[in-house]
Amino acid sequence: MSTTQGLTLALSKGRIFEETLPLLRAAGIEVLEDPETSRKLILPTNRDGVRIVMVRASDVPTYVQYGGADLGVAGRDVLHEQALAEGGSHGLYQPLDLKIARCRMSVATRADFDYAAAVKQGSRIRVATKYTEIARQHFADKGVHVDLIKLYGSMELAPLTGLAEAIVDLVSTGGTLRANKLVEVEQIMDISSRLVVNQAALKLKRDTLRPLIDAFAAAIA
Ligand code: ATP
Ligand code: MG
């Protein structure tokens, strides 16, 4: 664990950080610096011994699993993708769906690509995504033949450049898809962020963790 005293919470920049702030506030915790303007990777809070570490969204489960953080907030997209890749769950305790950073994982194509016809004909479809494990499972379940192309960002660009016919990506308002003349052709799963807790911390820091988890739960309800 991070320290014998105190609590370390792993968060990522953007929606997850912004939407976790009200939950922290409900638990009496104020973050004292803004990660968008601060260069610090460890942010202090108003509570002695409670600190925030800012990590990549996909690194949150790793920090919590190995005790670099006692708890963290991670998207279902990241948790599910990594669980499939590792052939099981991380041994992370996931006590709460925080219902924040909500979106869905979808298949999208160019508006002029006839996805339904390609599926019906049994054509091989090239699919670009960061979520290769979730995509592999989804298309296998549907019996759709795909060649998966792993990307690390800007998936929308793939169908526009001819790199792929389809993408699997997160969609919330659909604004980014529309701006790039892409259409959502299939929804794979609903996404929200979950609280993840280190198993050892849960036992050893129960007296600090339990009230925090309870305060989050009350704030969501
Ligand atoms: P990095 O910036 O470190 O490369 P990233 O760009 O892969 O990370 P983000 O796009 O910042 O990750 O998303 C982080 C998390 O926020 C995702 O894992 C997901 O759970 C959530 N998220 C991403 N996009 C949306 C969205 N459009 N609406 C709501 N939540 C989202
Ligand atoms: Mg990002």
Image (tube, rainbow, N blue to C red):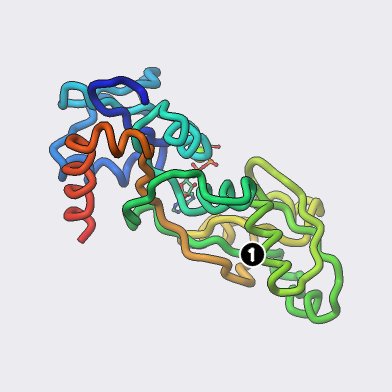
Give whichever of 90, 118 is nearer the camera.
90
Neighbourhood count class around disc 1 (C-alpha, 10 Å): few under 14, some 14–19, many 20 upward: many
Question: Which x, y percent locates residue 47?
Answer: 16, 26
Q: Quadrant of the C terminus?
A: bottom left
Question: Which x, y percent locates residue 40?
Answer: 37, 18
179 sits left or right of 28 in the view: right
Residue 36 visible in the current orientation: no
Above-or-below relation of 88 to 57 = below
> As shown in the figure, which amino acid type bears the numbered disc 1?
Val
Above-or-below relation of 138 to 101 = below
Identify the residue under disc 1: 107
188 sits left or right of 70 in the view: right
Give whichever of 115, 212 is nearer the camera.
212
Residue 59 visible in the current orientation: yes
Give whichever of 128, 217 is nearer the camera.
217
Query: Who's the residue at 77% across and 71% down the image?
Result: 144
Figure quadrant of residue 210: top left
Above-or-below relation of 186 to 217 = below
214 sits left or right of 110 in the view: left
Question: Which x, y percent locates residue 97?
Answer: 34, 56
Query: Who's the residue at 32% across and 54% down the image?
Result: 96
